[in-house]
Amino acid sequence: MKSTKQTKTAKIRKTVIPGKGMTLGITVTMLSLLILIPLASILAYSFKLTWSEFWAIIFRQNVMRAFATSIICAFIAAVINCVFGLILAWILVRYEFPGKRIMDAMIELPFALPTAVAGITLSKMYSTQGILGSFFDRFGISISYTRIGLTIALVFIGIPFVVRALQPVIEKLPASFEEASTMLGASGGYTFRRVILPELTPALLVGFGLALARGI
């Protein structure tokens, strides 16, 4: 009887979502058209180059500058995201205030907003004629189309990764740890460094890695 029931259950599970073959075919087709075929074409073109031509392209001055700009700006942005992402995640988890849900939903905005739209908006805002750019232009600081502007854009698109990586960990972190440390005479800074930060470090590193990868 049990084996008969298990067989019926297995059949039901297989037919809960019909059209598996068709949906799988559509998925593979879209994946091939959007990702696999373009990547294959890039690899096919690169294989036509000799090793000397390949390294000559890689070590061109403009290519090396592009690598340096991308990696340095992404690294700086990821570090900034770790600092402010930790603060944001802590506030959203540990405090109650008006507009908390709206702020929490706004964290997802960089995920929903196309990067091209974000880049155009930020470049306009920080240009010499923009709202914020005109203020910095008075002091001779140019932001748009510079490494500063690029870092700001990468902070914008990367901070949700840090916040979302830290929030579940902070939610599970008992407040009794902080209370016990305070009762034993530890200062706020010591409690953060020796009690809170070690618990958050793995999630913080995950958020840093995701923000860095996203920036690059």
Image: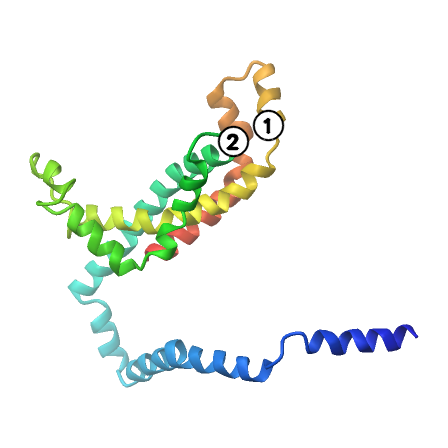
Position above or below: 31 against 76:
below
- Give the number of marks: 2
Question: Secondary structure under badge 1?
Answer: helix
Label drawn at residue 94: 2
**Residue occupied by mark 1:** 175
Horizontal side of 102 relative to 19 (left or right) equals left
Kindly indicate whether the residue at mark 1 contacts the one at mark 2 (C-beta within 8 angstroms): yes
Identify the amino acid type marked 2.
Arg
Q: From the top left corner, tell me how far across and down residue 101 is, in percent.
A: 45, 40
Q: Residue at x 54, y 37 (%)?
A: 170
Q: CA distance from mark 2 to mark 1?
A: 9 Å
| Viewer-side residue, 38 vs 27 | 27
- In the image: residue 126, left or right of residue 197: left
- Give the image quarter of residue 82: top left
Mark 2: give few (<14), some (14-19) or many (20+) Cα within 10 Å: few
Q: Residue at x 56, y 17 (%)?
A: 182
Does 80 appear above or below 13? above
At x 15% / y 52%, what residue is drawn? 145
| Amino acid at dot 1 | Ala
